[in-house]
Image: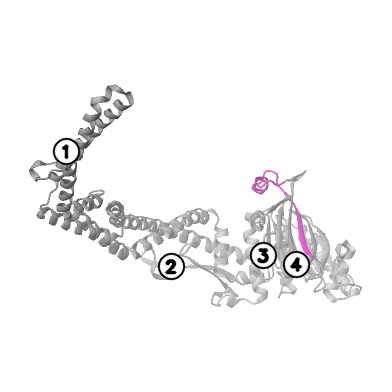
Amino acid sequence: MLEEIRIRGLGVIDDAALDLAAGLTVVSGETGAGKTMIVQGLGLLTGGRADYGLVRPGVERAFVEGRLLIPADSAVAARVRDVGGDLDDDPGGAVLVVGRTLTSEGRSRAQVAGRSVPASLLAEIAEDLIAVHGQSEAQRLLRPSTQRVALDRFAGHAVAGPLARYGVVYTELSRVSRALAEVTERSREREQEAELLRIGLAEVERVEPAPGEDVTLDAELTKLEHAETLVRTARTAHAALISDPASGSDDSGAVDLVSAARRVIAGDADLDADLAALGARLTEVSMLLTDVAADLASYAESIDADPERLADAQNRKAALTGLTRAHGTDIDGVLAWADQAGRRLLELDGAGDSAETLTARRDELTAELARLAATLSEARSAAAARFGEAVAAELAGLAMPRARVEAAVAQRDDPAGLPVGDRLVAFGPAGVDDVELRLIPHPGAPPRPVQKGASGGELSRVMLAIEVVLAADDAGSTMVFDEVDAGVGGRAAVEIGRRLARLARTHQVICITHLPQVAAFADRHLVVHKADDGSVTRSGVITLDDAGRVRELSRMLAGQEESTLARGHAEELLAAAAADKARP
């Protein structure tokens, strides 16, 4: 229950507080006195969209605060504790304080139980506590989605259960369908990529390069191409080390010269240890030169000047060069590419399996969704008849005794739709059904959509009748009506007041009204007055006593608070309403 609302700096309201109670609270006042700002404030408290133009000129911020009494063990109380909010203890439960601040610079801040929270949390908390029905609510009833939601609420678990599962399956089907579409759209690209990979891998397999082969082959080619030069160089160096008498030259080789020097030193080595050490070193040099000479001779003999081998190496070099040029890297890079390409080709070849898996999953989900859609349609159709009868019963008490309302449940054919029965029908996140409320104003009249067959006053009464029918499942919540009686008067106005009073037996009802017939049914009557400067202050929101109610109803009836006739009529209205409320 909403115990108090405080509004500061919002529209014409400077600083005002409304003390509320259980039952039916009526708020009245002259046009422009600020009653609508009360509804706007309640909309902000329930997480509604912030309109920064509502901030009162001359002030930095507007502030709305509400104090609610909720069960201490309720889901709302648990949610508030989850976000770290503090609830005050009360004999009737727990006290929850919520607030919303708007600044003239265009910033908004929400508070729940002393904690700053997103405005969406206000909406989440208020969903089960407060329902605000502004002047545009009747227009919302014209939307097919709103009409479907009303029927679903009336149907209860018969629709809520399969609808919850339908939503899960619908979301999964959408995801799978998107994935399948992406796989299908990219199939040609994958085929082209796979073909290029196969061509590249086939070329690598044909050449069969070995790791580092290009480097090794380059070294071999250099030796083959310069074989004569290398042989000549090795033999010349060998001759410089060891003389060859057969060559006809008298020059001594380096080995001979070193050996001669070693022999000279050996003759006198015993005379001095340093000279002996030098002789030993010459012995080492002689042995090293002898080994090098032998290696040079072997190297010269090993050089292969075979033209066929040179041609083979050049051909192999050409093949390797073709690979490295095609891939812009060396042979090791080519082999690394081939390894990656092989793995990628396996992925691409497996994409067909992925498409088959996705197709099977899509078909499975489609079949389940079709079964759930059929279940939803049956449940909605069964509830539609009962819903129409219940709303018609309420309309009979709202001065529309011969009117009937029917909820038509239908589907639209769609070649790309969901297979339900023997039809393909359009579907969406809430099923395959289009729900349309139709009004039959009197017997014999054709049913017409409420947006075409109802006047403004009739539409307000249809909306109120629907709210009364749906209210049975929301006992204990707060319902706010902003001029739901617009466009009606006379007997219809009395019946609206009577229905609001009946609704107030199980709910806290707050009604903004201009009609005295409705105000007469109030359990508490608040009137809003403007101060001389055009603002509404704390003193401008008054809770009326019995005498004050007579004066206010007189003003609402005739615009003359002291008119004897108006006062008599006001007293008569109050007495009739009291007698009506006293009936069981």
Q: Disc 4 on helix, strand or loop?
A: loop
Does residue 148 appear anywhere in the picture? Answer: yes
Real-space Cα separation, disc 2 to disc 3, in angstroms: 32 Å
Q: Which residue is mark 2?
A: 426
Q: Which residues are magenta?
A: 60-85
| Eye-nearest disc, 4 or 1 | 1
Q: Position of residue 573 (x, y in %)?
A: 81, 68
| Eye-nearest disc, 1 or 3 | 1
Real-space Cα separation, disc 2 to disc 1, in angstroms: 95 Å
Real-space Cα separation, disc 4 to disc 1, in angstroms: 101 Å
Q: Which residue is mark 1?
A: 294
Q: Disc 1 on helix, strand or loop?
A: helix
Do the numbered discs 4 and 2 sit on residues whose CB atoms are within 8 Å? no
| Eye-nearest disc, 2 or 1 | 1
> Which mark, residue 104?
4
| Eye-nearest disc, 3 or 4 | 4
Nearest the eye: 284 or 508: 284
| Eye-nearest disc, 2 or 3 | 3
Q: Residue furthest top?
A: 270
Mark 4 is on which residue type?
Answer: Ser
Quick check: 15 above or below 286? below
Question: Is residue 39 within the magenta segment?
Answer: no
Q: Which residue is mark 3?
A: 49
Nearest the eye: 224 or 526: 224
